[in-house]
Image: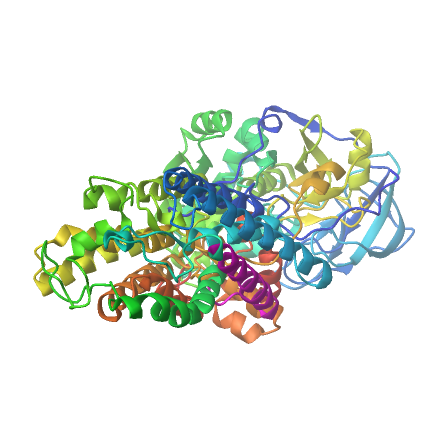
Amino acid sequence: MSNKNDLVVNPAPHIHSPMTKNRMMQYTFFAILATIVVSTILWSSVTTPSGWNLGTTVAICAFISVGIAVALDFLIGKVAVDSEVNTWSAAVFGLIVTACYSLGYPGMAVMDGTPIEMGIPVEAPLAFFYVALISVIGLVVFKKVMSLAGRKLVNPAAAAKFLVLLPATFTTLVTSWHLPTGMLMVPSLADGIGATTIVGGNGGAAFGSYLQGCYAIPTATTIDSIESIMLLAKYHGWVGGASSIAVIIAGIALFALGRKYFKWKITVSYLIAISVLSVIFSLAFGDVDLVTRLLFELFMGSSIFMAFFMATDPATTPYGGFGQIIFGIGLAVLTIIIQTFMGFFGGSLLALLIMNLAVPFIDRIRINKPFGR
Amino acid sequence: MANLVHIPEQKEIARKSPIEIFPDPKVAVVLINQQSGASNQLLVKVGDIVAIGQKIADTKERISAPVHSPISGKVIKIENAYNSCFEAPTDAIYIENDGKKTKDKSIIPITEAQLATTKNEDLLKIIREAGIVGMGGAGFPTSAKLAVPADKKIKYLLVNCAEGEPYDTADERIMIERTTNIVRGTRVVRKLLGNPKVIVVTKDSKVEAVQKLREAYSKEPDTEVRATHLTYQQGDAAMMQKAILGYETPAGKRSYEMGTIVQNVATINAIANAVFEGEPLISRVTTLNGDIAKPKNLLVKIGTPVSDILTANNISDCGSVVVGGVMMGVALQTSDAPVTKRTSSILCFSKATLKKAPKPTACIHCGRCVDACPVRLQPVAIYNAVIKGDFEKAEKMWAKDCIVCGTCSYVCPARVPLAANIKMARG
């Protein structure tokens, strides 16, 4: 034999399961892409006052964020000696940037009669700039630089969005829109929700009609029921969460395909904890309208999309099953508290960042002793 | 046990291939250490003429096993050679075959009728002198394992017929073709352990073997053949006790302290050969499998160079040769390395297969290894400690409890070499 001494010597085991990192990322990519396609189709029936079709806006945003992420990932992989080029991972990140960006045009803004000039970057072309900025910062700072330093501490898309939109909230949202109109337009959840009660004093309407005003299709003559809005189609908010049903189907399909490789325990424990807490809060505040609170907390875009696709990001969540359940419950508790008492209706984003930072500790908790101990 | 990972068996052709006798090698390369435990010293020197079955290396230590010449001929060379069972070099004795087949008869066999009246010490002496070691891969001297302290009562003898390693079918063929031999071997072991209950544990996928075992063991007293759906990991002795008897052996305790001995079927076959035929462990059945056209089972002399077997079977495109099982075995540095007592299989993987295999990448923290570990360790955490050189932390996380089954590396989607690094911490 000529090749006697040039045998490849690898450590045991010498075979591996067919699942690879890349395949996991491909599955995730197509699952998220499915939800974004649904959003694009749904939203293509709406045109904002600036003349942009919302569906087109979503599609362009997705191309921008994915394109930037993949290109930068490739570039960094070429110039940094020890950086892996993970094209699929970068593409997934790009899609999540678009999916967790708030687009749309709340119907209530035109309900006053004359369309209000929106200061928040929820419309094209300004939205393109923000999406691009989040994509760049998320990929470079929170994905690549953190990976080089050891491991990712926080979900890159969530952290980048938070970092970019925090100043935007103060400079554009509050000053150019909410302050001149005299209303913050965001009702509080920290009291009993009823069909007619205006809670917190700063809402323009009762909670149910606020939801309908905010999320229903702006061109509609008859407003859809809260159930159908929260479950089937919202026309404002997170791109990825436009249709809760679509997210749930895509998410379950993903978990079924990559069985045992995706952290579905986080999703399940989060959704159960959210439901239980909503009921508890509802009883505590004496809600007339329990269903509205429950639907809002569960199926708002930031909640449902995050539960399936962001809270399950492998790198920034606990690796043990027990830790994943703690993580899901913690995420739910923080989300509910932030949304109820801080009046911040994207509370799960902040909650996710806090829980991400707690992961190194959660990973150290173990109840499961080794065999025979 | 819901989390045990199923690994495809890949045994379809090999399990149907009868054992073929492979011709004696022209030059046998016998490693003087093929056991775990005390090291052997040479008993021969260059130029000596040896007979088949003659002891050529031994030691006086208790936990040890001698090695024997597999062929008759002349010792032509003694040198440090690549060791295919410990991943480190050891002395090897090169014996040139003279073709005379002269036999050494220092082991005096007994007949089956004599078994009941033979003293346990004499039986253990035969097993010790025959150089029998655990043939499932561990290589632990069997005479030491079966010499159970008198105050310990053994309740169960589990005959390990699981053969969990994918590709390997040598044990399965032994079960089919040497059934009566393993039954009488089981009698020897049962007598040594004070007549415990015997459970023959096998997998339901070994249809033909299960049938043969059921027939052969049906007349044995206090014996049960149990064919269940075992996964690869349950071939491990501790895991098997959990699966069959339901308890977890406390860490640090030996299996016999819990009243159970698990004995591999190939070892029992070797015990029968030694006790009733006077034949020391100089040959074994091994599976030739992998990316090859004709997987088969061969009865080969220990000391046969692997390259002889590959050449005889026209296997030339080898990127990697793995001996002793695809999950726990060792990849050979050179195919000149010989077959040892622990070579349960010889697996060839083509260059094309190796090329297709994904390269190791960074961990993505998915936690699959944590979920899959059969002994409930946290492989990724131990791995992270090991690569930082923090062996103290690794030990705190029970790295020593690892059974080196390789499941963590098998499932890892990033192909992180978890098992290999944890093995380092385990020592």
Residue A330, quarter of picture: bottom left
Relative vertical location of residue A140 with respect to residue B3 in this rendering, above or below = below
Colour setting: rainbow
Instruction: Provide residue A327's location: percent of width, then percent of height.
Output: 35, 62
Count of numbered marks: 0
Taking A221 as reference, is A159 left or right? right
Query: Which residue is rendered at x = 38% and y = 42% of the image?
Result: A43
Residue B274, quarter of picture: top right
Taking B382 as reference, is B303 left or right? right
Q: Residue furthest front?
A: A114
Viewer-side residue, B350 vs A168:
A168
Viewer-side residue, A267 vs A54:
A54
Tell me, yes or no, whether the highlighted magenta stretch contains residue A137. yes
Tell me, yes or no, whether the highlighted magenta stretch contains residue B149. no
**Magenta region:** A127-154
Predominant SS along the magenta part = helix
Q: Is residue B192 visible?
A: no
Q: Is residue B233 visible?
A: yes
Viewer-side residue, B46 vs B403:
B403
Relative vertical location of residue B255 with respect to residue A224 in this rendering, above or below = below
Instruction: Provide residue A94's location: percent of width, then percent of height.
Output: 52, 52
Query: Which residue is rendered at x = 39% and y = 42% of the image?
Result: A39
Query: Which residue is rendered at x = 42% and y = 61% of the image?
Result: A370
Relative vertical location of residue A332 with respect to residue B347 in this rendering, above or below = below
Instruction: Provide residue B77's location: percent of width, then percent of height.
Output: 89, 52
Instruction: Provide residue A328's location: percent of width, then percent of height.
Output: 33, 59
Q: Quadrant of the C terminus of chain B?
A: bottom right
Taking B141 as reference, is A160 left or right? left
